[in-house]
Image: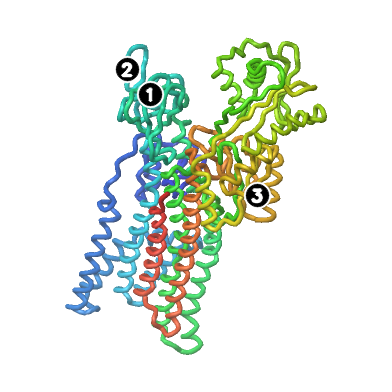
Amino acid sequence: MNVKHLEGVVDAKINFGASKIMVKGKTNIEALEKAGAFDNLKLWNENEKKIDREHYWKQKETIKVYILAIFLVLYWFLGKRFGEEHILLKFGYVVGILIGGYRLFLKGLKNLARLKFDMNTLMTIAIMGACIIGQWSEGATVVILFVISEVLERYSMDKARQSIETLLDIAPKEAIILRGIKELVVHVNDIQVGDIMIVKPGKKVAMDGIVINGTSTINQAAITGESIPVKKTIDDLVFAGTLNDEGLLEVKVTKLVKDTTISKIIHLVEEAQAERAPSQVFVDKFAKYYTPAIIVLALLMAIVPPLLFKADWGKWIYEGLAILVVGCPCALVVSTPVAIVTAIGNAARNGVLIKGGIHLEEAGSINTFAFDKTGTLTKGVPKVIDILTFGGNECEWLSIAASIEKKSQHPLASAITKRAKEKGLDFDDLFVEEFQSITGRGVKAKVNNQWYYVGSLNLFESLFQPIEEGIRKNIDRMQAEGKTVIVLGTDKEILSLMAVADELRESSKEVISKLYQLGIKHTIMLTGDNQQTAESIGKEVGILDVKAGLLPEDKLNLIKELRSKHHSVAMIGDGVNDAPALAASTVGVAMGGAGTDAALEIADIVLMADDLSKLPYTIKLSRKALAIIKQNITLALAIKAIALLLVIPGWLTLWIAIFADMGATLIVTLNSLRLINIKK
């Protein structure tokens, strides 16, 4: 609020999860720190090197705790020696309350003046009330324990934020750039697209780029979570923040520092940590009514027994003050965000990008998984296995097919052009004109003034009937073997059949098995491939429900149908061709997000490596996070309910109240931090 009132500031937003403040307008760091001096804010520009903070246990607020802890011991010692009413002891109580509580009181009184009731307001009323009725010792103890609780809570939140801070430190701030014949050390902010970067063995890659010279292995664990280094050679992509193991690489920079994959990951993780999950929205709404209700309850407890039953005013005012302390919503408020921040940070370190608390929670309740085939269950690198020709020369028909398919964007097109290159065919010289794509079926074009069609059997069935029995039998045989058949022909006859196979991922079968073990009720494959090939792949990996021959809109409609039947449906695809289906699913999961902008934008969850085995880990983490959030809310409310029940026999004291509040807060934060240990 103070920052918004600064001269030149138009708007300001705080992201507590990422420990960031975004300011719109004209101001400077000094003015922002002055505005946040009350909360000891220390700021730096995110584009600059992070300021080294003091060790946590040496910070001013933590040192205050040491001093107050000494006061607590002295209170006990002096009370035993001189008695509770000694003037020296009362003076010590006042000093302890002022040292520990002056920030709390300022916030609480300011909130009280605005009729804003939160933790600071409740604690201020309770402590000041305790002093007014002469309970100096308990007022001082409550202040000290409250400060200790805040420090431990801040420490827990800092631990949860460390995952994002680790990401911030991954990429180096400087790189060796080749300018002419000179090698210069240049700050990443000054590196331009097209610059040549030298990456020496044992050094980190500073920018995203393409290898133009050299061969090496790169440890990409920071980006993709892969534990095994990946071989990189000419034309391969490398990412900022990854580690070059052994060879010298020359890399052509393809992105500015703000657009690198690691920068996008950090930005998306920070946004995800700021986004409120459904459980957090519920808690915030609950706290909105809970806190005023506690104040009303405390007021009634303080005045009803004395007025109606002539009970002792001092005793029941004291009980009312204790209710205010135990009713502080600290534990409830932190029950969800610490768990969300910890889980999303853990996932990011393991190569899984979860783009918000809502997606984290929804992933934990998924009961149906829909898989794309090509590039998801298979490696997405198709290869021509068989070629059959019906009249004419195999090389001639392959050249024509390759000349047409080189203009196509279909994944199978590359298999045909690659096979033609392997055979040494010079298909680039063929004159191709009037190229047209036939959605979901294939392509057509004129080659040397003759129309040719390349596509599925369905395409040729729409051109002429019937298909020769011998050709159909060959197609059926190839499809039964799990191959996809591409047909070349004219509008009158079929000239050649090309059988393409896409290698199954080694992890696919194991992943499907693990999902079933996790209790997933239903898996389904959605593919544009033919039914026989799809069923063959599905049977091999363990997916029995297969929908084949689908266009993108068919996949979209099937996802909608699955959602109406099973409610929570996840779609796993490549993030580009499956965009509509990913968007329509409860949770869209994209494969191989590293370097793929579309996947980072479209999906709710991104598996940064082409590693399907991270899917069970993601579900396990999401479920654990969901369970911990529920545990936290239950524990926070249960502990407070038990403490409040102590009012009935009149056993609730300020000591018990603050211990209940502090204990509940510590339990939920430590419980949330268990998510740090969830590993793939």
Which mark is drawn over residue 183?
2
Front tag of 1 and 2: 1
Find the distance from the CA under tag 3 to the CA under tag 2: 58 Å
Which mark is drawn over residue 215?
1
Instruction: Please tell me which residue is depicted at 36% across the width and 51% down the height of the picture.
Output: 158
Q: Position of residue 421 (x, y in %)?
A: 56, 18
Disc 2 crowd rating (10 Å Cα; few below 14, some 14-19, many 20+) is some
Query: In the displayed image of the protein, which residue is found farthest to the left?
Result: 81
Read off the residue under disc 3. 545
Find the distance from the CA under tag 1 to the CA under tag 2: 20 Å
Tell me if 496 is positioned left or right of 345 in this view. Answer: right
Q: Position of residue 45 (x, y in %)?
A: 39, 36
In the rendered structure, which disc, 1 or 3, sits on the residue that comes first in sequence?
Answer: 1
Q: Nearer the viewer, residue 419 or 581?
A: 419
Of helix, strand and loop, which one carries label 3?
strand
Disc 3 crowd rating (10 Å Cα; few below 14, some 14-19, many 20+) is some
